[in-house]
Image (cartoon, grey):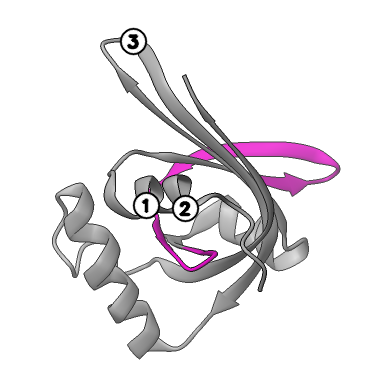
Amino acid sequence: MADVLPDEAETLLSEVSVMAHLATCSDDRPHVAPVWYHYEDGIVSILTSGRKLANIRTNPRVALSIQKDTAGDAEWKVTMQGTAAVVEDEEEVMKAAERINPRYGADTDAYPENTLVRIEVGSGTFTRY
């Protein structure tokens, strides 16, 4: 896979713990919701359930928006578009929970109802303010 994002953006996505906003599609309308994530080598992993997961199962095309602010001032933002794949393997779900949940202050075994979704980033933009 070709590098879609500059190295600086990939470093920030890998190291900074901020929320992502995931956009899925339902009945030709966007649905946007905050999610925790893990980024590595052009793949965004999330653990999710409910409407987001149902939407992805129907239409795997998604978008993500991630922005870092300090005291209300934007520092940087990344937007990405990609294709999501649902991963049902329990071992892979646990590995993802070990990477994602502690990053956001949650126990690894929190939210056992969540399913792993991997998003292959196809395009993206990065802006530093």
For the view shown, which residue lies furthest in the front direction? 7
Q: Is residue 78 left or right of residue 72?
A: right
Which residue lies at the image location 52% right of the left edge and 68% below the top edge? 117
Give, as a single range, the part of the protein colored magenta.
24-44
Q: CA distance from mark 2 to mark 3?
A: 25 Å
Judging by the rendered image, the residue that carries numbered circle 3 is 72
The first of marks 2 and 3 along the sequence is 2
Q: CA distance from mark 1 to mark 3?
A: 22 Å
* Residue 25 visible to the viewer: yes
Between tags 1 and 3, which lies in front?
Answer: 1
Vertical order, 10 against 16 (above or below): below
Q: Nearer the viewer, mark 2 or mark 3?
A: 2
Q: Is residue 37 magenta?
A: yes
Image quadrant in which the N terminus is located: bottom right
- Residue highlighted by disc 1: 11
Residue 70 lies, in percent from the top left, at 28, 18
The dot on residue 7 is 2
**x, y percent for residue 57:** 69, 67
Nearest the eye: 94 or 58? 94
Q: Amino acid at mark 3?
A: Gly
| Label whose residue precedes the other's in the sequence (1 or 3) | 1
